[in-house]
Image: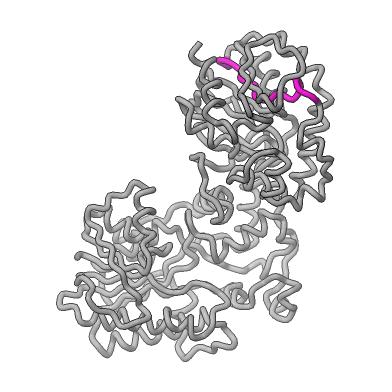
Amino acid sequence: MDAIVFGASGFIGRHLVAELLARGQRVAAAVREDTLTAWLGARGAGTGGLSVVTADITRPLSGLPAARDVYNTAGRYAFGLTRQAARAANVTGALNVLHWAATLPDLRRLVHVSGYRVSAASGPPDYAALGAYEASKIEGDLAVRAAAARLGVPLTIANPSAVIGPGQYIGPATLVRDLWNGRLPALPGGTATFVPVVEAGYFARFLAEIPGGPAGEHYWVLDDATPHLPELIGLIAAHLGVRAPRRSIPAGLLRRLPRALTGADPETLSFLSAERYPTASARAFATGAGLRTPPVDDVLRAWADDLVGTRFGAATPALRPYGFHDVAGGRTWITGERHRPAYVLLHGLPMNADLWAPVAAHLDGPVLAPDLPGLGRSAPAPSADAWLEALMGPVGTRPVLVAHSLACGPALRFAAGHPERVGAVVLIAPAFLQAPAARITRSGLAVPTLRRMSAARLAGILGVAESPEVASAAADLRRPGVARRMVAAMRTAFAEREQIRALLERVDVPVHIVAGSADPLTLTAGHPVTEIPGAGHYPQLTHPIEVARAARRPSRR
């Protein structure tokens, strides 16, 4: 093989394998469990040169395919490990890889991935002071360097900072998670705290170039342009449309306070430092290889989008692409095609854009599905009508405007004001034509109750089965302000029922109405109606094929 990658199913390892395969190399991926193949398949990566082999680096290695270049990206990156568990992967495992590499007759390079706060150490680590993770990485780094010198193994060590990108949910991601959920009242550290990052794709390209360079180097690979921690969190907060904390707590004080009070893992506190690192050799090597770091602000924003889109690793997004965009002066979560959609899908309460995932799979064109302002993952906007005007601004098609329940009002007002920009309107379970007490209203839920709502209980209230779409809505209700804004939106929609009914008679585009037999219309619509047998107020979840079929009819006409 051209290369063998240990830890190939890990975050760094899989990006490296993808990069090597893209360069036409024959790659052996050494894994304990193969999750790599599915990941590569989802990315559309060619796997013709890939061979997946099973290996446990905590034991002596044998029977593996020989390779010219050996990459060790394996290790345990976790806090709260026992000393034994941390050493098994980060010390014993690293030495097992090195000893196996030393037996290869045509070895060109062993590339060992260490850490940016590790290779600066010069003596045995203090496990009690540092914690098992960082101490074991330091011990492993020292041991690998000594053994490589003794055995004559051509070694290069790469010391990355926090490697970020889609799929990275540990390290600094915990700060972003707390920020997003309103549980970050103060920033750890001070104004000069420097927690550098490096983008995963760039780091993979850097690693792929190392075997062609000189041996014996130690490269600190991080983006020196990473903002100080307060600015970094401020940048992400602005992108997500949430408030950044204004106060900070010095790391020294955090160490003295009880963990139950601060919520901070003691092992993470050593990373809250103002230190800078010797990156000159890595920058010179990257320049020689023609590598350029992507703009760190863009990397941070894209990473934040992925963290929110995947619920910090707890969910798989069904609608892509996704991310935050500025709409009418507020940050809006948008999924799908922003410029040339065939359908614009507007959800009702208490859901978000994920509600449309089952339906979108059966539509015959691209969709644009946002979270309504102030609901789901979107920040508030001055008004729903101004927001919808701004959302439709970049749209260059005449899409079918599909609205559910609460969203029927804004959809009709837009269609009435801009008939030339809408091909048709489909109203699903329009609350203004139904009995005023829908299931979610009848429950009489208070804001505190909504904020504690589990996915199972919410599904029961909505009269649907528990699903990823319901779980997504329940997660948003737990965020600060969302439940309160949902209740306010329900009151506003109820007060506008008469106005919307009058508007329905004046809309100058085709209108089609969809309702479930278990949630029927109680007022005359004056437009074609499709009643779905057995469906309730959320037919998108229970009868997505029938809803998609009804949404396609106006576009065919």
Asked if residue 389 can be seen in this view, the reply is: no
- 521 vs 72, nearest the viewer: 521
Task: Find out whether residue 46 is within the magenta segment.
Answer: no
Q: Decide if residue 404 is on the left or right side of residue 136.
A: right
Residue placed farthest to the left in the image? 105
- Magenta-span inclusion, residue 425: yes
- Residue at the spot 49% in from the left edge and 85% down from the top edge: 84
Q: Position of residue 141 (x, y in %)?
A: 40, 82
Q: Describe residue 42's horizontal placement relative to residue 373 as left or right.
A: left
- Residue 281, horizontal then vertical, whole percent: 37, 70
- What percent of the width, then of the height, locates residue 267? 59, 77
Q: Residue at x 42, y 74 (%)?
A: 75
Q: Nearer the viewer, residue 377 or 463?
A: 463
Q: Is residue 523 visible?
A: yes
Range of magenta residues = 421-435
Q: Is residue 251 above or below residue 44?
A: below
Front-lying residue, 463 or 276: 463
State which quadrant residue 326 falls in: top right
Position above or below: 440 against 75: above
Where is 555 relative to 153, above or below? Answer: above
Give residue 220's quadrant in the image.
Answer: bottom left
User: Which quadrant is the N terminus positioned in?
Assistant: bottom left
Residue 203 in the image, given as x and y percentages of width and height? 39, 61
Q: How many numbered discs?
A: 0
Q: Nearer the viewer, residue 73 or 325?
A: 73
Residue at the image point whose x is 34% and y is 59% from the top: 205
